[in-house]
Structures are given as C-alpha cells and as structure tokens.
Amino acid sequence: MLKPYLGAKIILAEPMPFVEFKDKFGHFGKSPDNEPGYHVVYPAAHSGEQDYHSWSPAVVFEEAYRLLNAGETAFVVGHSVTMHIGPQKGDYNEPTKRW
C-alpha cells in the first residue's frame, strides 16, 4: 500500500527567466523564453560530484520552497550541512566555501 512521505531539501536558488537559464546553461526545454522562474542548484550528494543545476517555473517553485530566514540560515551553517556555494553576490562569495 502506498503511503505519503514528506521530503525536504535545502537548495540554492535565484530568480531567472527561462531564456537567461537557457543561454547560461545550454538547456533547451519547452517553456516560453520569457517565463519567470528560478535557477535551482541541488548540492552534490557525494564528494567529487558536481552540483546539479535546474530551472523551475516561478509558480511551481514558489509553491514548493520558501526563503530561509536569518535564524534558519545560521542554524544550517552552524550544523555544517554540506552545500556548495558557487560564486554568489553577498556574504557567500567564495567558490569553494561549504556551509
């Protein structure tokens, strides 16, 4: 018998229209170029693997995720959750920094 399960991931994301994601990552999908959405980075599961980059339509993304507040971010950072932080604007701008 199938049972419901709830999963949770902490990801990195930034608003990005599909056309920009397509130009940056060479992705060819079926979304209209001007569709608003998010560039999503799923951290590598194992050492030596690369992070996975994806794009999500804004409506889908905003139903599934919410931005962590300062306290939640501090908790994640304080508990050494391994997450690759690529070149970013703001506090976490070291290409090899790990949370």
Image (cartoon, grey):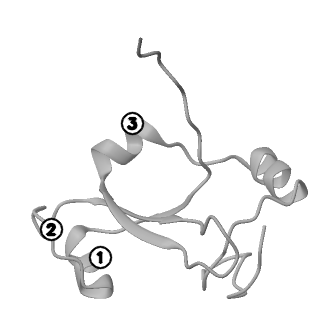
| Lower sequence index among marks 2 and 1 | 1
**Circle 3 is placed at which residue position?**
63
Residue 49 image point, x, y percent: 59, 78
Kind of residue at disc 3: Glu
Across and down, in percent, residue 78 comes to 90, 56
- Residue 32 at what x, y percent from top left? 9, 64
Q: Amino acid at mark 1?
A: Phe
Up/down of 41 relative to 94, above or below: above
Comparing labels 2 and 1, the label whose residue is closer to the camera: 2
Give, as a three-letter code, the residue at label 2. Gly
Does the residue at mark 2 contact the one at mark 1 (Cβ under 8 Å)?
no
Mark whose residue sits in front, 2 or 3: 2
Callout 3: 10 Å neighbours few (<14), some, many (20+)?
few
**Number of numbered discs overlaid on the protein picture:** 3
Q: Residue at point 31% right, 43% down?
A: 60
Mark toward the start of the polypeptide (2 vs 3): 2
Q: Which residue is mark 2?
A: 29
Q: Earlier in the sequence, mark 1 or mark 3?
A: 1
Q: Quadrant of the N terminus?
A: top left
The crowd level at tag 2 (other Cα within 10 Å; few <14, some 14-19, many 20+) is: few
- Above or below, 62 against 97 in this view is above
- Quadrant containing the C terminus in the rendered view: bottom right
Residue at the location (23% across, 69% down)?
18
In this figure, which residue is indicated by the disc labeled 1?
A: 21
